Image (cartoon, rainbow, N blue to C red):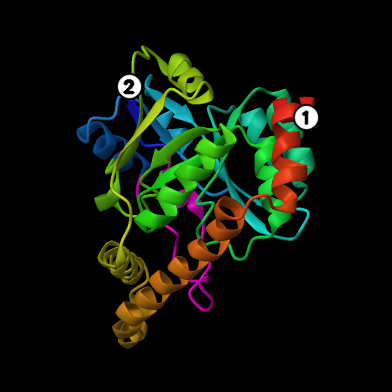
Amino acid sequence: MRCDLHVHTRHSGMCTVPLLDRVCRESYNDPESVYEALKHQGMDLVTVTDHDSIDATESLCKYPDFFLSEEVSAVSPSGTNLHIGVYDIREQHHQEIERRRDDLMSLVAYLGEQQLFFTINHVYSSLTGQRTESDFTLFARYFPGIEALNGQIPEVCNRRASDLAATLGKGVMGGSDAHTMAALGRTYTAVSGARNKDEFISGLRCGQASLHGESGNYWKLTGAVIQLASKMMQEKPWTLCLAPLFLLVPAVTLANCFRELAFVYQWSSRTLNRRPRAFRAAGWREAQESPEAEL
């Protein structure tokens, strides 16, 4: 079975870019259109991972092959912002997740108690800001999965995330991270032999997933930003006055690509190439031996 496990709709809220965060959405994708596009791309199951929202379920819960998920914005004890994919949840899960998401240790304890599969997303991307070595110790101890193929970030970021997952013995998942319709289903996760949603999720937990499709690149990112800007101006015509600013988009996205490369080389060298590191010896070994790792 196939499923794109990282998908956004218009319910993902506003973008986080300063100045535009009051006028531009993270995504303008309509949930019904998302469902149809994913089925057209050959997905056997459909889920949506909006930022801290399950509002898309209102129009999609009628489909038997749909299951509810979300991308949770959380903060680690070090103050690092994180995005956590949480899969196959219910409304009561979402409510408790909202209550706990500013306390990462409480959140991961709850997710573990509920036996939910969850992942640290775009682990080697600068999207949510800087990392600390203690963050990686937490990923090793408490997270059952790592997003190892994201359709919007450079291939090297995904390759290093896959290496990290293999080193830690974590389950993997992949998805398009589509904020526009064009990217939907271009990157996805498959679990061979799964016959239904429960077997698919079980396959993720047991490390039986295979990842397929595209990573991101400069051209893909630039096109997505331009598409979002176009949708913003259609929804709010007065923002046409901002159109001259979008001449800067190619330069901004190019700078972002260089920032991503610097970030992945910085943090992968600390977490994959230097042995032993203090957090690796004290944290990763404990993660494999401690009962806490079962959370």
Q: Which residue is mark 2?
A: 1
Q: Say whether residue 151 is left or right of residue 122.
A: left
- Which badge, 2 or 1, comes first in the chain's sequence? 2
User: Label 1 sits on what residue type?
Assistant: Glu
Magenta range is: 6-30
Q: Residues within 10 Å of mark 2 (few under 14, many from 20)?
A: some
Which is in the foreground here, disc 2 or disc 1? 1
What is the distance, in whole Å, between disc 2 and disc 1 at their CAs? 31 Å
**Number of dots carrying numbers:** 2
* Residue 12 falls inside the magenta stretch: yes
User: Label 2 sits on what residue type?
Assistant: Met
Is 90 drawn above or below residue 21 in the view shown?
A: above
Residue 274 in the image: state x and y as whole percent.
61, 55
Q: Quadrant of the N terminus?
A: top left
Residue 179 in the image: state x and y as whole percent.
37, 54
Whether residues under marks 2 and 1 lie with C-beta atoms below 8 angstroms apart, the answer is: no
Q: Which residue is mark 1?
A: 292
